[in-house]
Amino acid sequence: MSRDIAQLQQTALGELTQADSPETLAAWKSRYLGGKGMLKDLMSRIGSIAPDDRKTYGQTVNALKDTLTAAFEAREQAVNSVMLTREIEQGALDITLPARPRPQGRLHPSTRTLRRIYEIWAEMGFQVFLSRDVEDDETNFTLLNFPPDHPARDMQDTFYTTDPNIIMRTHTSPGQIRSMRAYGENGTQPVRVVLPGMCYRFEQITHRSEVQFHQVEGIVVGRNIRMSDLKGTFAEFVRRMFGDKAGLRFRASYFPFTEPSMEIDLECFVCGGQGCRICKHSGWLEIAGSGMIHPNVLRNGGYDPTEWSGFAFGMGPERITLLRHGIEDIRYFWANDQRFLNQF
Amino acid sequence: MHLPLSWLKEFVDIDIAPEEVAERLTVSGLEVGHLRYIGVPQQVIPGIRQPRSDHLVWDRERLVLGAIREVLPHPNADKLVLAMVDYGADTLEQCVTGAPNLREYLGRGPLNPPLWTAFAREGAVVYDGHSDERKLMTLKGKELRGIYNKSMVCSEKELGISDEHEGVILLDPQPTFAAGTPLQDVLGDVILDVELTPNLGHCWSVLGVARELAALLNKPLRQPSYAFVAQGSPIDGQVTVAIEQPELNPRFTLTLLRGTQVKASPQWMQYRLRLVGQRPINNIVDVTNYVTFEIGQPLHAYDYDKLVARAGGKPPALVTRLPHEGEVLQTLDGSRRALGSNQILVADGAGALGLGGIMGGADTEITETTTTVLLEAAAWNFINIRKTQQAQKLFTEAGTRFSRNIHPSRAVLGSSRGIELMRQLGGGQVAAGVVDIYPLPPALVKVALPVSEVRRLLGVDVSVQQVADLLSRASFDVAIDGDTLHVTAPDYRTDISARVVGQADLVEEVARLIGYDRIPSTMIEDIMPPQHTNRVFEFQEAVRDLCVALGMTENISYRFTSVEAEARLVPPGASSSLPAEGYVTMANPIAPEKSVLRHTLLINLLENAASNARFVSRQQVFEIGSVYLRRDAGLPDEPLRLGILLTGKRDEPHWAGSTQAAFDFYDIKGAVEGVLVGLHVAGITLRRGTHTSFHPGRSADVLLNGVYAGTFGELHPLVAQAFRLTGAPVMVAELLLDVVLEAVLPRHGIISLPGTPAVLEDLALVVQEEITGQQVEDVIRKGGGKLLRGVRLFDVYRGGNLPAGTTSLAYALTYQVDDRTLTDDEVAKVREKIIRIAERELGAKLRS
């Protein structure tokens, strides 16, 4: 009998080595270990075994069962492993085929630049103050120290509306007056804000000039604000916006609403100041106008200019964007061509 | 303004390179936009950035000062002559030339003094005078009509000075001239193109810029001579002037030159005028222009005899006055100009003579026959000059300067300088005296400047003496009184005001003289201002982020449109749903299609979509911005809107398969809901759309707490046609962001996360097709009560074995309680209740 069992074990293990798929493994398992399998059959025959031999017989069958079960599990694992390796080998994809696009929206490049500007100024305590697009002549010019018919007005070509004294703001500076009046509490509280917004100038639309553009202006009013603060603070901004190595040039200029006034030039980041097409071979890029707030403007904002002082600066996000990305046609900004917008 | 460095050097010693001059001026507020080199090499100065110039540098060996000793005829050509040129060598060079201005010297024998000219030897590089473009050529020997020639006498064009090619350069003899001197040392120059801001009226001249330079470099300034030789009988009684409007014309001066000769100006003056961009005319007119550029005081010359004739033989009686009703003036440029009421005239008894301070009239201009010149130098109100220039669209060198506020003190300097130069160039006798009517001399501007103000505003540590010295350098008169400086501004500094503004003016002056680069850089030490809530701004940016997260790309469009463009948003025959307010209308539109401010973002979205449709197959865009609603009084309303547009294929075509379906109503609904839910807006209800620009059956109005907040849905097909958007249905939305902002919950709570299992179950109800999905969902929620946590529609079915006129709506329901596991019994009871209520309220049947 035990020779039969030994024979069976040898046959079963031999067959097991031939099983190399889940189907043949399942067939083998059913044949030997299944509910109607050979082991079950051997066990059921225990009654026909001599009582004295029954114990030994039982142990022998059980040992066979353990052996076959262990062999099966080992074989199954080996087969699975081979199968998996084969599956992995066969499952390789052409990774160069085009991706399935994820839905992706994009911010307008001007918004991206504006946000970068807000972010840097916010860290220095400047809040955003929104001001209106359509202005009265008084706030856009007169309160900013542009007297009526003054030649300083020649610097800004204005869109007039058919309503008297109502114009399109030519700069974000009227926001200086509005923010000082809103936050200054009649000239008793300091103010530190940035004033973003769309501005409008009566100019022919060409690849270099537009009738509307964003500006971001910033103002600080306090009891101890100096021109040296303007230089230092703006230099901080420039380092954040354009990098640690960005060289700056401060030069005198004229804006009716600041005095002293200055233009801020940035060393051309395209050519490193060596001169290129972008900087018109000058090595410098004009990036901001600035100055100490004019006493008349402080007064119009509610402050006593002998006790309070402040600085202001203004820059153009489209100009910055245009320089950074080498955009040669400013009309791209409001054309909303998807092919342009998708590049940001 | 073009300024030759050689001219500046007449007034100030300049011992730094031209490039450094340009940098110093630029940094101090007189921006030098461009340097034009004449013959001299560009210098590279460390630390100064400048564009590289590709101009012609004159060869010092081969381009030299030549002296033409004799002009001989060419044996074989009538139009050519032989110039015998001494260029410092042992022998004269025979040079063949066709220069017309040498012909008059033919047959005069040896010339003494010689004619001084620019001489180019063999091998010199010059511009080709006969080419229309700027083309360089190297001078080579060749035969010209049988005479071998290897050199050239040059025109200004050939040297790159100007386009002048009528004749060769002939220079007025100078004692220092020596044949063979490198031309660079004689004519070499650098022209500074200075751009002046409107406050710098006192810098609109060579002298004005030289004065700035003298202060910056701390060098003395040499004034031109204002003395004149007057040997004629007095001007008194020869002419009178009356000023009717002293406010508009505070000063008027006249001088008189008799017996002069009108002819061409000397070469040096013509040359300089050409360098600054003026066309030489004759000696008298040239002097008026020269003095304008030299000292910044515009002049005007009259033919005195013509004035006498107009006065019927009597001494002219000039008057400056406002025009009569309907008065017309013919100006020197030939235009007949109708005059506005504020446009001040110089006139005599016979009528207008000129537009004061801007341009003279044709009647009394200087001609070749003029022998007696009456010279005007006056002062005018700068605001009025600017208004007149703009109204007449007439911008002259004189008007530009007068509109920058030239001080009346300059007038008499101009008349003295001008009349003397005219005498020197044309001969004659100057009448003794000056007619000088000066009813309104402005007071000198005095400012008390505490030096503490300089420190306070600039953040620099300067002493009282340092500030006093700086201001003195710029010709301010300064008296020190403790910490305070009593400063008197030089009269020409019309940009300096009194009191607090004057202090700021002086602080700026000090900063400019210190140099902005030497002002230290500091961080703000002042206290941080109170911070404020910033709801609208933060909200606006949150909406942007949500739209981007929902897969849409931001547009920013022109605020300008036209009434006609927006009218296309209303289908023919329909009433308009656009704002009823008026348009904000441009008085000076840049173009008819940009004549008003938009009333709606739909106009931009649709126009953008139409132009993009040529290039892309799907568009998902949004724009956030104001629309502009005119009010009868005051500034317009500028409410914020959000516009969304979806059109084209929902999925981008992809090789592994994609739906080819187009965006539909439920996509735009998803976009709008995504924004509103993302913002935590409360109280959202929808009703069938009422906006006429939308498809009436496929659009919805959004109500927030009962207030209209916008419409979304499919664009009305007729509107789509009007915008040529016929490719795919266009889904749009316009939301009133101010209304949306009001509905945003200040805070929103969250639903806690139960650990108990949910029971999921599907339920399909068959209803009459008029019943809306919302009604069905409402009754399900009503029946489900607290146990029903989720309701999701997963199928809508019509037809098949369903009764006609009915719809089956299948929902996936989620039941859950927080503290225990629901039993089958409990769920079955709720389900029965839902079915019962649905049947009772909507006549719904459970779909079997």
Image (tube, coloured by chain):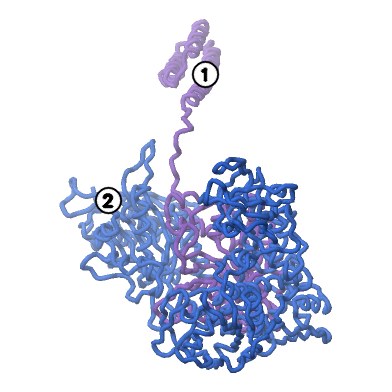
For residue A182, say whether it is visible: no
Q: Which of the two marks, 2 or 1, is nearer to us in this view?
A: 2
Q: Return the x and y of residue B740 as percentages of the image width and height.
A: 42, 68
Looking at the image, the residue that sits furthest to the top is: A3
Q: Residue at x 72, y 73 (%)?
A: B211
Question: Disc 2 and disc 1: Cα gap in Å?
Answer: 51 Å
Dividing the picture into quadrants, the one containing residue B738 is bottom left
Question: Helix, strand, or loop for circle 1?
Answer: helix
Indicate the chain on which mark 1 is placed: A
**Image mark for residue B687:** none
Residue that carries the numbered disc 1 in the rendered image: A75
- Colour for chain B in the figure: blue
Q: Amino acid at mark 1?
A: Arg
Image point (60%, 83%), residue name? B258
Rendered position, A310 above or below B241: above
- Position above or below: A326 against B262: above
Q: Residue at horizontal 66%, vertical 88%?
A: B432
A177 or B587: nearer the eye? B587
**Relative depth, front residue between B299 and A31:** B299
Residue B140 location, x and y as percent? 62, 41
Q: Which residue is mark 2?
A: B796
Whether residue A19 is visible to the viewer of this picture, yes or no, is yes
Q: Amino acid at mark 2?
A: Val
Secondary structure under tag 2 reads: strand
